[in-house]
Image: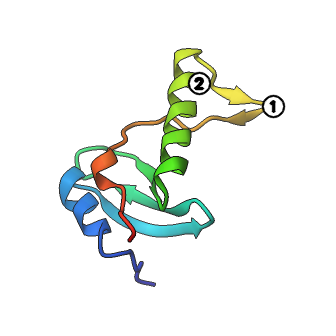
Amino acid sequence: MRLVLPDWSGTYRHHLDAEPLDSLGTGTQGIVFAALRPRYPFVFTVMFHLRQVACDREVSVSLRLQDLDVQEVCGHPIPELLHHDDELLPTRS
């Protein structure tokens, strides 16, 4: 099954040399997919937020949890924020 991504995902693919592998789902905040970068030996997830406010909130919370060295909440692991780039946030008119 071929993963169909929005047009702006090509910018991400080129910018960070990451190849999408499989869709993990969509929701009210955006689209999540698994990706692989040739120079790293692990699969990671990428989320394309559809709204700036949702992106800002998630990045802020992730950075705060990293600063506090929180790695899990109620037994659930907290994903590590590897990178974020406001330039890749899609714009809607």
Which type of secondary structure does the marked residue at label 1 adopt?
Answer: loop
> Left or right: 25 with respect to 56?
right
Where residue 2 appears, x then y in whole percent? 40, 83
> Left or right: 49 with respect to 89?
right
> Left or right: 40 with respect to 80?
left
Q: Quadrant of the C terminus?
A: bottom left
- Tell me the kind of residue under disc 1: Cys
- Tell me the kind of residue under disc 2: Leu
Q: Residue at x 36, y 55 (%)?
A: 89
Which residue reaches farthest top? 68
Q: Nearer the viewer, residue 25 or 43?
A: 25
> Left or right: 93 with respect to 8?
right
Which residue reaches farthest right? 74
Q: Residue at x 62, y 35 (%)?
A: 78
Q: Nearer the viewer, residue 42 or 53?
A: 53
Between marks 1 and 2 in the image, the one whose residue lies nearer the viewer: 2
Where residue 60 appears, x then y in whole percent? 52, 32
Disc assigned to residue 65? 2
Location of residue 79 (image quadrant): top right
| Disc nearer the start of the sequence (1/2) | 2
Residue that mark 1 sits on = 74
Q: Residue at x 63, y 21 (%)?
A: 70
